């Protein structure tokens, strides 16, 4: 059974960091952890999901789930991996999970030897399946959430007049940004698609009208509606962007590291630093 929401206490001993979409880029993460002086005995690292696929070391990133200092939420790539493995165990299934998985960077599973296949099936996949879709860390003004895509209800597909005319089903669920109080299993269980695939919020941001903040980690574009009433700062990834973006309490931090292009990077952010940058 899926876990939807996990709550963790304040880190009294060290620092809390948040990392963008890893996508198999373990080498980039290790370099960043060295740069920031990460202390595995005191610090914690929170991942916005999408640990595997596309990059060179998916297994290495999945093995992070064994570390006591590493915490991750489920993204769409975790769900695709689980769906693919479920279909592989049921060869007569009519699901398109395999084609979806391989189209999105899952080819690495074909290169695993027998030992690695057993490790994935028997140890790592159960850890992936146990991941929550949302994490809440701390309490009070310094509280933050971690999710993969967005905390917004309703279908990720925008309704169109064509869909209505064609007689296609239209999702009547109101499209609303969640608040801290509404992060319940009952609500989250009905919105897996937007939690893992949504790009509506970041798509609404007018980048040209946003305020730029220069930080040691790069620019943050702050929209004209930076914080959503009742929702604590929420770190998300999923959508590769040129600069970090703050909109409706969502801080988008996926910089497309797996492409290895000059204008991309893997962000590892100290939550206390982020609060200072954003004056929260």
Image (cartoon, helix red, strand yellow):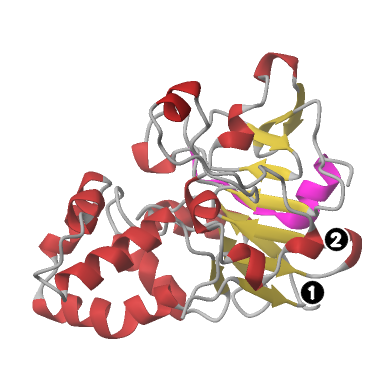
Residue stretch in magenta: 265-277
Q: Say if the magenta span includes residue 269.
A: yes
Along the horizontal axis of the image, is 210 left or right of 79? right
Label 2 with label 1: CB-CB less than 8 Å: yes
**Residue assigned mark 2:** 142
Image quadrant assignment for residue 41: bottom right
Residue sitting nearer the eye, 273 or 54: 54
Q: Where is residue 45 in the image (x, y as percent from the top left)?
A: 60, 66
Element under disc 2: helix
Image quadrant assignment for residue 115: bottom left
Element under disc 1: loop
Q: Residue at x 46, y 59 (%)?
A: 30
- Residue 250 position (above or below residue 128): above
Q: Say if the magenta span includes residue 133.
A: no
Q: Residue at x 76, y 75 (%)?
A: 11
Image quadrant assignment for residue 86: bottom left
- For mark 1, does the 10 Å Cα neighbourhood hold few (<14), some (14 to 19), or many (20 or more) residues? some
Q: Residue at x 87, y 46 (%)?
A: 229
Residue sitting nearer the eye, 101 or 66: 101
Q: Position of residue 273 (x, y in %)?
A: 78, 50
Q: How far apart are marks 2 and 1 (CA)?
A: 9 Å
Along the horizontal axis of the image, is 153 left or right of 197? right
Q: Where is residue 129 in the image (x, y as percent from the top left)?
A: 41, 75
For residue 104, which numbered disc appears in the image? none
Along the horizontal axis of the image, is 200 left or right of 205? left
Dot 2 or dot 1: first in sequence order is 1
- Residue 31 position (above or below residue 122): above
Residue sitting nearer the eye, 45 or 151: 151
Q: Can residue 38 be seen in this view?
A: no
**Residue assigned mark 1:** 10
Q: Where is residue 254 in the image (x, y as percent from the top left)?
A: 53, 42
- For mark 2, does the 10 Å Cα neighbourhood hold few (<14), some (14 to 19), or many (20 or more) residues? some
């Amino acid at each position: 059974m899926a876990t939807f929401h996990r709550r963790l206490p304040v880190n009294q001993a060290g620092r809390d960091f948040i990392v963008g979409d890893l996508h198999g880029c373990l080498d980039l993460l290790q370099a960043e952890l060295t740069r920031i002086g990460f202390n595995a005995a005191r610090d914690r690292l929170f991942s916005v999901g999408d640990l595997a696929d596309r990059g060179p070391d998916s297994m290495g990133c999945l093995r992070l789930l064994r570390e006591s200092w590493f915490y991750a939420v489920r993204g769409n790539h975790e769900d695709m991996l689980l769906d693919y493995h479920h279909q592989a165990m049921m060869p007569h299934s009519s699901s398109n999970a395999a084609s979806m998985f391989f189209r999105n960077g899952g080819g690495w599973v074909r290169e695993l030897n027998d030992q690695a296949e057993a490790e994935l099936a028997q140890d790592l996949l159960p850890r992936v399946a146990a991941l929550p879709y949302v994490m809440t860390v701390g309490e009070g003004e310094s509280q933050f959430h971690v999710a993969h895509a967005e905390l917004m209800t309703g279908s990720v597909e925008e309704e169109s007049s064509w869909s209505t005319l064609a007689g296609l089903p239209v999702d009547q669920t109101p499209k609303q940004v969640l608040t801290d109080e509404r992060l319940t299993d009952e609500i989250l269980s009905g919105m897996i698609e937007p939690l893992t695939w949504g790009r509506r919020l970041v798509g609404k941001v007018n980048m040209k009208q946003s305020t730029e903040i220069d930080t040691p980690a790069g620019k943050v574009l702050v929209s004209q509606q930076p914080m959503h009433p009742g929702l604590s700062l929420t770190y998300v990834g999923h959508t590769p962007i040129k600069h970090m973006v703050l909109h409706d309490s969502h801080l988008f931090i996926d910089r497309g590291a797996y492409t290895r292009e000059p204008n991309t990077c893997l962000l590892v952010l100290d939550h206390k630093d982020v609060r200072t940058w954003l004056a929260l």
